[in-house]
Image (spheres, rainbow, N blue to C red):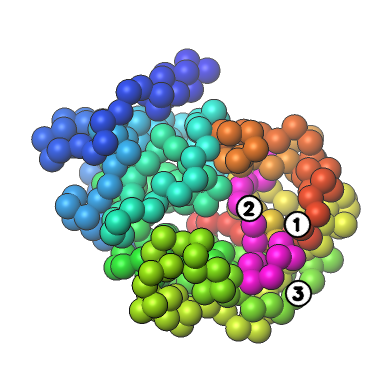
């Protein structure tokens, strides 16, 4: 409990817009474990990174040090460990957006996607027996961008279906939805962005960027999902594990999913732990997963995936 209180104090401290190189060097003070191999993916240069504030690196290093000290090695256990340490972190949308595409590092403000990216990067760094924010940043770049390398706005993976496919191909994640009892499939065009360009600052006045995005949208895409009516089934509950990533499948045209989080299993009952827009923070939802989804008119099911060991 003291560790969580200390970390939350770090997260809520006053922030400057972006650290200078000298501040960044001073902040990265947590001890690191000598690496045995290069991290998956190569973090971009400091000049192409955007920090929320100068304490980002300190908070990340402290979290990673706690992860190393925990002795946990299982990916799902580490995902749950880090998610619980991030409870209470404010929900803030659009933190990745700016005048140019930069590798954004922001541990202080999370939305539903940056939340699971953060959990992935913290977990993968710990599994590699590292505890430096630089290794964490390399994994953020690796999971966020197509092929693991940041370019312009179009290289960021914007749809969860491609995010899952791309990261599976590179050995980062595995989707377990097809292995869950009663899993089904749907076919859908995933092309919301190019049909709603006015909603995206990078697209509304840039036809060339729209065309770049269009090339990576998915036509007649077939993907697995589990209908929400099955989420109270005993066999389905038994197949879910704490620390699984979960995406809520939507019936909205052009979109595959509408929200992301992780599963926490308590006494055999799965719950959603997420960066909640309605709750305004990272939180454990009070109702079991199937009850949580009952209130939604648009979410028709879920997809489940895990970090590869």
Q: Are marks 2 and 1 in contact (CB under 8 Å)?
A: yes
Residue 56: x %, y % from top left = 32, 35
Specify few, some or many for label 2: CA neighbours under 10 Å numbering under 14, 14-19, or 20 or more: many
- In this view, the residue farthest toward the top is 2
Of the numbered discs 2 and 1, the one sitting upstream in the chain is 2
Q: Which residue is mark 2?
A: 259
Q: Evaluate whether residue 72 shows in this view.
A: no
Q: Position of residue 32 (x, y in %)?
A: 25, 37
Tell me where the magenta segment starts and ends, as one range. 250-264
What is the count of numbered marks? 3
Q: Residue at x 36, y 72 (%)?
A: 206
Q: Residues within 10 Å of mark 3 (few under 14, many from 20)?
A: few
Q: Which residue is mark 3?
A: 185
Q: Earlier in the sequence, mark 1 or mark 3?
A: 3
Q: Is residue 14 visible?
A: yes
Q: CA distance from mark 2 to mark 3?
A: 19 Å
Q: Which mark is residue 299?
A: 1
Q: CA distance from mark 2 to mark 1?
A: 9 Å
Residue 285 position in % (x across, y down): 70, 35
Seen at 39% across and 64% down, the residue is 202
């Amino acid at each position: 409990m003291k560790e969580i209180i200390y970390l939350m104090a770090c997260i809520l401290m006053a922030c400057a817009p972006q650290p200078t190189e000298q501040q960044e060097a001073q902040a990265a003070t947590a001890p690191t474990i000598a690496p045995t191999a290069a991290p998956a993916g190569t973090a971009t240069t400091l000049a192409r990174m955007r920090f929320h504030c100068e304490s980002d690196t300190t908070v990340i290093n402290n979290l990673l040090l706690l992860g190393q000290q925990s002795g946990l090695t299982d990916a799902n256990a580490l995902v749950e460990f880090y998610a619980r340490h991030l409870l209470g972190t404010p929900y803030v949308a659009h933190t990745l957006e700016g005048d140019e595409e930069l590798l954004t590092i922001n541990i202080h403000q999370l939305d539903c996607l940056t939340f699971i990216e953060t959990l992935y990067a913290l977990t993968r760094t710990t599994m590699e027996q590292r505890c430096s924010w630089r290794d964490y940043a390399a994994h953020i770049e690796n999971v966020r961008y197509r092929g693991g390398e940041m370019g312009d706005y179009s290289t960021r993976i914007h749809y969860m279906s491609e995010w899952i496919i791309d990261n599976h191909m590179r050995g980062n994640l595995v989707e377990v939805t097809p292995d869950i009892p009663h899993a089904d499939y749907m076919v859908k065009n995933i092309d919301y962005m190019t049909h709603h360009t006015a909603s995206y600052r990078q697209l509304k006045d840039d036809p060339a960027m729209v065309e770049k995005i269009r090339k990576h949208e998915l036509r007649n895409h077939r993907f697995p999902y589990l209908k929400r009516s099955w989420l109270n089934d005993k066999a389905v509950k038994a197949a879910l594990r704490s620390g699984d990533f979960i995406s809520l499948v939507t019936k909205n045209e052009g979109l595959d999913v509408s929200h992301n989080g992780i599963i926490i299993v308590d006494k055999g009952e799965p719950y959603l732990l997420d960066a909640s827009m309605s709750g305004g923070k990272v939180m454990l939802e009070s109702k079991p997963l199937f009850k949580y989804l009952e209130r939604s008119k648009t979410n028709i099911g879920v997809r489940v995936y895990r970090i590869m060991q």
